[in-house]
Image (cartoon, rainbow, N blue to C red):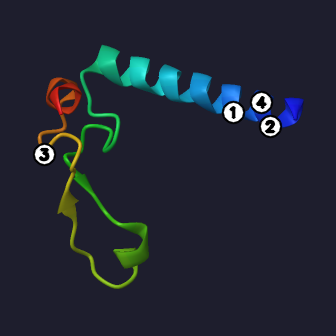
């Protein structure tokens, strides 16, 4: 049981650190500031990309935090 709690805590701390780094840089945490995501399942099928749903394609942390 403690192992699962330790893993969950580690993942939470890792996510918080990622969010803090992205906030300092002003980048969307979902797309790392690119403004788009390439779905893994469609990467090999189609080279198209989709606007990031987190920031609506802007790549900005401010836009991401408002949603």
Image position of 31 (left or right of 56) = right
Q: Which residue is mark 4?
A: 5
* Front residue of 4 and 25: 4
**Rendered image: mark on residue 56:** 3
Do residues under tags 1 and 2 come within 8 Å of each other at their CB atoms? yes
Residue 22 falls in which quadrant of the image? top left
Q: Position of residue 51 (x, y in %)?
A: 16, 55
Do residues under tags 2 and 4 come within 8 Å of each other at their CB atoms? yes
Q: Which residue is mark 1?
A: 8
Image position of 20 (left or right of 16) = left
**Dot 1: element:** helix
Image position of 16 (left or right of 26) = right
Query: Label 4: how many residues lie within 10 Å, few (<14), some (14-19) or many (20+)?
Result: few
Q: Position of residue 54 (x, y in %)?
A: 23, 42
Image point (80%, 37%), residue name? 4
Where is the N terminus found, in terms of image quarters? top right
The residues tagged by marks 4 and 3 sit, at their Cα atoms, a distance apart of 34 Å
* Front residue of 33 and 64: 64
The residues tagged by marks 1 and 2 sit, at their Cα atoms, a distance apart of 6 Å
Do residues under tags 3 and 1 come within 8 Å of each other at their CB atoms? no
N-terminal label among 4 and 3: 4
* Front residue of 60 and 66: 66
Query: Label 1: how many residues lie within 10 Å, few (<14), some (14-19) or many (20+)?
Result: few
Q: Which residue is mark 2?
A: 4
The residues tagged by marks 2 and 4 sit, at their Cα atoms, a distance apart of 4 Å
Q: Is residue 23 above or below residue 30?
A: above
């Amino acid at each position: 049981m403690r192992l699962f709690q330790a893993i969950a805590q580690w993942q939470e701390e890792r996510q918080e650190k990622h969010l803090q780094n992205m906030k300092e840089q002003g980048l969307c945490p979902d797309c790392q500031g690119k403004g788009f995501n390439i779905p893994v399942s469609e990467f090999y099928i189609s080279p198209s990309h989709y606007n990031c749903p987190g920031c609506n394609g802007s790549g900005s942390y401010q836009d991401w935090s408002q949603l």
